[in-house]
Image (spheres, rainbow, N blue to C red):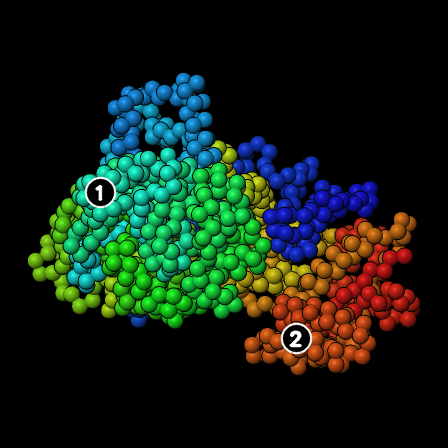
Amino acid sequence: TNHTHNGSNSLNIEIHLDSHNKKSTYNIRHHQIIHHEEDIMAPTVAAPTAEMADLSVSTAPKGTAKRDALVANEIAVQSLWESEKAFECNPSYDAETGEKDEKFIVTFPYPYSNGHLHLGHAFSLTKAVFRAQFERNRGKNSLFPFAFHCTGMPIQAAANKLKSEIEQFGAPPKFPEEDPAIRAQMEAELAAAAKAKADKAAATGAKAKGGKTKLVQKTGTGIVRQWNILKKMVPEDEIPQFADPVHWLMYFPPIGVEHMKRFGSGVDWRRAFITTSVNGYYDAFIRWQFNVLREKGKVLFGKRNNVYSIVDGQVCADHDRSEGEGVGPQEYVLIKLKVLAPDHGQERHAKVEKLLKRVDEEGKKGVFLVPATLRPETMYGQTNCFVLPTGEYGAYYVDATDEVFIMSARSARGLSCQAYDAANDVYFTKEFGKIECLETFTGDELLGLPLKAPNASYEKVYTLPLLTISMGKGTGVVTSVPSDAPDDYVALKALKDKPDFAAKYGITPDMVEPFEVVPIISIEGYGDASAVTMCEKLGITSFNDKVKLAQAKDETYLKGFTIGVMTVGPHAGKKVSEAKPLIKEEMIAANQAHLYFEPESKVVSRTNDECVVASTDQWYLAYGEESWCSAVKKHVLDDETFNAYDPTSLEKYETTLDWLKEWACTRQFGLGTFLPWDQHWVIESLSDSTIYMAYYTIAHYLQGENNLNGDESRSPENIKVEDLTDDVFNFIYRKGFPVPKTSAIPGETLEKMRAEFRYWYPMDLRVSAKDLIPNHLTMALYNHAAIWDDEPELWPRGYYTNGHIMVDAEKMSKSKGNFLMMLECVEKYSADATRFACADAGDTLDDANFSRDTANTAIVSLSNEAAWIKEILVDGDKSNLRSGDELNFMDKVLDNETNRLIKATEDCFAAMQFREGLQKGWFEMMIARNDYRSWCQDSDIPMHEGVVRKWAESLIVLICPICPHWSETLWKDLGKEGLAVKASWPIAGEENKLLTRQAKFLRDSIKNFRNQVGKAKKGWKDATVVVAENYPQWKVDALLWMQTQFDKESGSFPATFMKDLKDWSTTNVSDKKQVKFTMQFVSFMKKEVEDVGEMAMDIKCPFDQLAILKESQAYLKAQLNLEDVGIGSIDDAELAVPDRVSQNVSPGKPYLWIR
């Protein structure tokens, strides 16, 4: 904060507001705040009302009176909305033409009902809420429905965990960690495990992820008890009831409804519901959906590799995970390196020798080290094999091949769940999920073993140490190809160059010295040993050079695959990309290799089981099928049919459509809907959530308000679940199906439901956090395209996605004390102030920042502005205001600014840019009013009632999407009819761009004059504002050239404008020093043109500067705290303006001459 005293009763304060990167100047005189904005984007502090005796400048309210008043007002407004059924939407049609009135339906992914809604929900939710209300104010029939998701494993797993805790520790439970000593020990063990994980990630050069699961992040402790989680949300004596998963469905959704109402969400609650078979109506809808998908050949059955929980006994989809959301299966190739008889007489090989003897005696087919590789085509270049000396390995018997594989226990566990020959239903092991371990080894016990490596040019290679192997990825065994793998080259070279290092691990010279790099792939620009080339190029000398090694690896692998050419083997001469699949299949056919799968990264189920990849019999949706995928992609990439609102989001949809393939859509237990033709399976949570937006359109006929669970006795149309046959749903939702003749549902009711669906569909907008792009959002597109394949006009019209929310620039976490619940924010800040801060938090895919200071400031700002509007337009003496048709300069400016900001705010909201819309519709509206109020006060001219009223009524509607309770109250206070949430968007007159420029001229002049006053020497009192009517010739020339470059039709300059400017300047400006000034001037004027149009290029100032300044003379004196300010032209001979002053004056840029 920079501040300067300008007199005995005035203080200038310059405030730099980091949250908006803007600077404001406040001139405080006589307990009034006059606000001036350099970049007109920073939040303003409203001027105190006249009766305030003392000035208080603060970002937060003192006490809670203002907050309490806002909250009390919100509750009253919500009651009004409910009584008026403000958000209940029904189809409406033009009385004359019968055409349907313009509608808008926006939806939001229903939240999972295993707890209360938090700020993360609220932030994403506001994007839908704001847009729905904006469209309502625009006169559209705007529907925002809502529901609650209960399908899947999370609730089931939590209920099971609670049941286990009660059985083990009682109710209420006596947990061992209640003993401080035991708790300290448990926490130390958890901390040690987290540190070990981080150290391992650092040692391997992997990108370390947070060691906390979602649950730990939310609870703030590593000791997680389900009882304690529930204790924070429900009365303790009710907790035992939550051992029944159905109780969760009865308890949390109704609370969610109440919290949403307190947030002012504007939902049509008649259409609300919960999922799962508990709600028979929704259950019937999902059964119909899957019958249609099967009818269209989209649901298939067979063995597929999916992320799988052995403990749960089923596939673990994204919503079933506590860690690893979005992670899928990764295919590897297991290379079989046959263990030969140890040939160096080392004692550490005794267990291996014993194993080899046993295998031979039992007639088994050998022992193999089995590294997992992504590059089978490089096996021609093998020189050795690596293991981790401290790693733990096992020898596992593989029934399918009658062989023994040496690998990590983790990878063996995964292998036991996978198919050796899927076509013939043969697995690697006889018993799914179980594998026999014949022996265990440390990595050290495997070092120095001779191996037979398939496709290698060496008859025999050895097992060597590599200290950077991760036992959490692959098999813990790594085959070495130093020609094309930088890590392998550096490790082998270290063993050769450092005999002491090799000797430390019992590695003799003959195990490393004879093994030279074997060239196998030629890459243009990298030679035939790209790893060697890159290591030498980057100066890599040690496997501790992790960053450089990662760079070298990425570059060699990419170039090798895309432009590399095989130089050895039967596929020599072929591109690597062509040879790779052929070599893989040949090695598998020769029994030299097998396919092996594991998750791309660690996945943990909600039952705390580390998942594997399993090949299981599975019903799956055929995502990725060529015709299906191409239809969806065509729809998404056509901006006439789909709006992603952000090019980055659009790229993510395209990428997802390229990689999303067959999706396991059923589970064997958990909450949900049973597959209609195979009752052994339950439809999983992502698959029963793809077209439920269509269910919203008829839910109020089936369930109605306060009937989330679908109680048949409360059905508004007395519809029974059993009557919701596929024929009924086909008639309602699909084209060309007749009214079911035998239905118990009246034909009139069926017709109404069909008409309602046809009225609301297609869905205009779906709002979500960005992490649903790779699954739910893309799947919803697929399913719409399948169900309505003959009506693409019914497919979703737009998706908007946002980033996650941080609080005060930190990730939400209980341990940091910033994990905020929705209701907590409403009670602490009010709903409107919370929504205000959410709007200000950001709109991009980047993580947004909810500032608690912004929420507190909003309380003050909303309260003060409401008080001022009421004081001026409701409670105040109208004789203190002007009226009539005669408007002065600043009346016209405020009216013009109001027009400009109405349009600007509308454009922002329509583009889902709510932060920018808040800047326009609130902050800049405040600035415009503040300038007007100050001008009138300093000029001793009353404000104009009509102008102020238009500004206030416009402000109320502009901010209504964000702060509807505040708007509703003021709407009534101003005597307006109807509800603010139904009020029409203000009608904006055409912006007078010349007047906008004149206002900017005055505002910028004041700012510049204020800076000049601050720099004036002590004792200087005479001040004259000097203006110029004409530019110097060099500027005139530049402006005339700009006019020739400007395209009036597009209202813009060509893309090559700056390059053309440089060429023109160097050719037409003789003075080289003047070229720089010319380019700076033109660059500045180009921005002026973009702001106000082509008039900015006029070679004379297009308005009367002297008239504006003279009309504002009193304002200037007051703002600058000067006794007198003269105003004159630079051409006035009597002024005798010196050259040093005149050089600073140009048309539209006056100068304050102080002397």
SS type, badge 1: helix
> Which residue is disc 2 drawn over?
1059
What residue appears at the point 36 percent right and 46 percent down from the top-left corner?
450
- Using the rendered view, name the quadrant where residue 1063 is placed: bottom right
Q: Does the rendering let one see residue 164? A: yes
Measured as percent of width and height from the top left, residue 990 is found at 56, 69
Disc 1 crowd rating (10 Å Cα; few below 14, some 14-19, many 20+) is few
User: Which residue is painted at 56% across and 79% down in the image?
Assistant: 1049
Q: Is residue 765 left or right of residue 1003?
A: left
Which image quadrant for residue 900?
bottom right
The earlier-in-sequence mark between 2 and 1 is: 1
Picture quadrant where residue 920 is located: bottom right
Q: How many marks?
A: 2
Q: Position of residue 1130 (x, y in %)?
A: 85, 69
In the rendered structure, the answer to whether residue 257 lies left or right of residue 730 reads right
Residue farthest left in this picture: 742
Camera-side residue of 969 and 407: 407
Seen from the viewer's position, the closer of residues 386 and 1108 is 386
Other residues around mark 2 within 10 Å, as few (<14) / some (14–19) / many (≥20): few
Q: Quadrant of the C terminus?
A: bottom right
Question: What amino acid does circle 2 point to?
Answer: Lys
From the viewer's perspective, is residue 1063 above or below residue 902? below
Amino acid type, label 1? Asp
Mark 2, mark 1: which one is toward the viewer?
A: 1
Q: Nearer the viewer, residue 198 or 242?
A: 198
- Identify the residue shown where x is 64% and y is 48%: 17
The answer for how far apart the CA atoms under marks 2 and 1 are is 79 Å
Quadrant where the N terminus lies?
A: top right
Residue bearing the label numbered 1: 360
Vertical arrangement, residue 832 with respect to residue 566, above or below: above
Instruction: Please say if the residues under marks 2 and 1 sit with CB atoms less than 8 Å apart.
Output: no
